Structures are given as C-alpha cells and as structure tokens.
Amino acid sequence: MLTFIGAVLVFIIMVDAVWTTLTTRGSGFLAGPLTVGLRWVMRTLSYKTGNRNMLAHTGTLTIITLVLFWLCGLWLGWGLIFIGMPGSVIEDGDMQLANLVRYFYFVGFTLSTLGIGDLRPVGDISRILTSVAAFNGLILVTLMISYAIPLLNGVISRRKLAFHLSLLGDNMTNLVLNAWNGEDFRDLESTIHLVSGEIIQCAENRLAYPVLDYFYSYEREFSLGLQLATVDEALNLLVSGVDKSLLPAESTISNIRKIIQLYLTRCHAAISHIEADVPPLPSLSPLSHSGLSLQSDKTFETSMAEFNERRRLLHKLVLHEGWEWTDVSPA
C-alpha cells in the first residue's frame, strides 16, 4: 500500500513540475495554489507592516518554495516506495536491514545522483527502482534549471520595458506634455512602434510564467503594470481631451491599445479578485496651460466614459503591483 501511495505521489509531483516548467499553460494544479497562497501571505504582511519592500522578495521566495516543494514531494514519494518493500535496502557492510531514517537517507543520495554510499538495494526490482529514482532526480533538477533561466530573462525583459516606458514621463500628464513637440503628437508613433513588440513578448511570457507577476519592484520605474497604466491613461487623455488633428495616426493608437489589452487578458486571473473602482477623471488644466487645443469638458467626460471598464482593470493591475492610482495620475 505504501509503495502504491508513493508511486502516486511521485507521479503527481512530476506532472505538476512538467506542467509548470514545460507548457505555456501556467502553473500546475499544485504549484498554482501554492504560489498564490504565498503571494497572499507576502502581500498581507506588506500591507500590515507598511513595508512595501517585502513584496520585492516574493518572486525569489516563490521559486525557492516551489523547488523545495517538488524536491520534498519526490523524496517522500520514493521513500514510501522503498519503505513499502521491506528488505529492499540493506547496510553495505554488515548486511543489516535499513531502518526508517536510512530509507530516506538512501532515497536522498539516490535522487541527488551522488552514488549508492553505505547502503545498497537488494533484489532486481529494488535495483531497477534505484536507477529510475536517480534518473527522476536528474530530470527534476534539469526541469528546474530550464524553468529558472527563461524566468529570470523574463524578469529582466519586464524591468527593461518598464524603465523604457518610464522615460516617457513619470505620470500620465507629464507623458502627454513630453510628447508635445509644439505642433502635434506624431513623435509618439515611433516610440509606440518601438515598444509594441516588447509588450507582446512580456504578455506571452506572463502566460507561460505566471510567477513573473511575483517579482515586484519597489522602484516605480521598473514596475511594468504601473508604466502600462500610465501609457494607457495618457492615450485616454489624448484621444478624449485633445484636438483630433494633433494626434498620432488612429491605427497606431488602436494597435497599442489592443496590445495593452492583450497584457490585461494575460493578467486576468491574477487581478480578477482585486476590488477597484473606476479611477477619477484626470484634469485637463495642466494641458490647457501649455497652449494645446482641447475638447470641451462635456466632450471629454463623455469620451472618457467609454473607457471606464478598461480603466478599472488597469486600476486593478496597478493595485496588484502594490501601487496606487495617484502614481499614474496625480490628484
């Protein structure tokens, strides 16, 4: 019975590890709840202590927890397999049967492929299972390495893109003012084309590696969710508040909106539980002082109302990354 339970546990752990590391369908059925629970704990501690820097360690802690979870699960599973086969492991010197502790010791150095050591399997079945366990341990370590490398590359790509976007302006009003060249906003087109591909890549990375969301940044310049919300709100301000003749090509704005929507779609599961209202309307006053030709207040309000649901989702994304909407649009 113990052997059967151990085999089932090994199978479940390996399916979860393979699902998480080798597919593009997100975390496995065990890794998913485990990482979500850990993130909830870290967010709760961060809010209760008022120390936002704690969130910055969530990603690293999540990876360490996943690795230990899979290793311990595999260790326990193979331990039960051998314990369920009495007399399957003996001392190499005096031929005494292994006790409970030594069974797990035997499984430990077998999974780590360090060699047999001072214990050895007895019988053909035990020898074959020992070889399978060694291969199993090697496969799991390989999977974890193959998962960690692209994951860290994804973190770097997100930070790089976020910083690139932050250079456009530290909030949506400054972004709009910085994009004004004195005649129109056409210079934004080249910037939008430049970052579009990077946003798509980050969105697809997010689908393959949901754990990317757990790598929070305590610096706003490196928070991708915050920067995407800032860019989108700046586009709302331009489309709804500025004379149409000054705007970039309509297709350019439409395409970047679709790309940001793709990112929001990929993050839906992570932000769906967050409560957030539609953010207050931004003020047109800073733009009026710059001499821009603006729409009437009524036209502005009517146009902005079309984006209410999108703005609410972006508000969720900002809160999810540990920021407030005032970091996007100062009051």
Image (cartoon, rainbow, N blue to C red):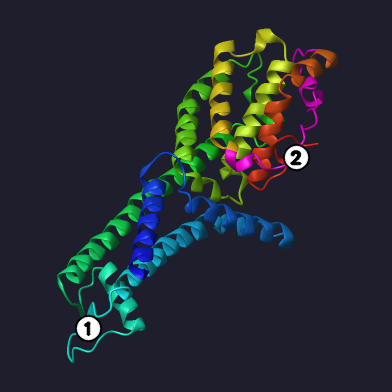
Q: Which residues are magenta?
A: 269-296
Quadrant (top left, top right, bottom left, bottom right) of the C terminus? top right
Q: Residue 326 — which label?
A: 2
Can residue 192 be seen in the rendering of this structure?
Answer: yes
Check if residue 278 falls in the magenta segment: yes
Neighbours of disc 2 within 10 Å: few (<14), some (14-19), many (20+): few
Camera-side residue of 325 and 222: 325
Q: Main secondary structure of the magenta part?
A: loop
Neighbours of disc 1 within 10 Å: few (<14), some (14-19), many (20+): many
Quadrant of the rendered image containing residue 90: bottom left
- Please state which amino acid type lies under the numbered disc 2: Thr
Quadrant of the rendered image containing residue 23: top left
- Please state which amino acid type lies under the numbered disc 1: Ile
Q: Nearer the viewer, mark 1 or mark 2?
A: 1
Question: Element under label 1?
Answer: strand
Q: Are marks 1 and 2 in contact (CB under 8 Å)?
A: no
Q: Residue at x 53, y 23 (%)?
A: 192
Does 149 sit left or right of 241 as displayed? left
Q: Residue 273, how many percent across, how many down?
A: 67, 43
Q: Residue at x 36, y 65 (%)?
A: 6
Vertical order, 246 against 7 (above or below)? above
Quadrant of the rendered image containing residue 272: top right
The residue where tag 1 is placed is 90
Can residue 241 be seen in the rendering of this structure?
Answer: no
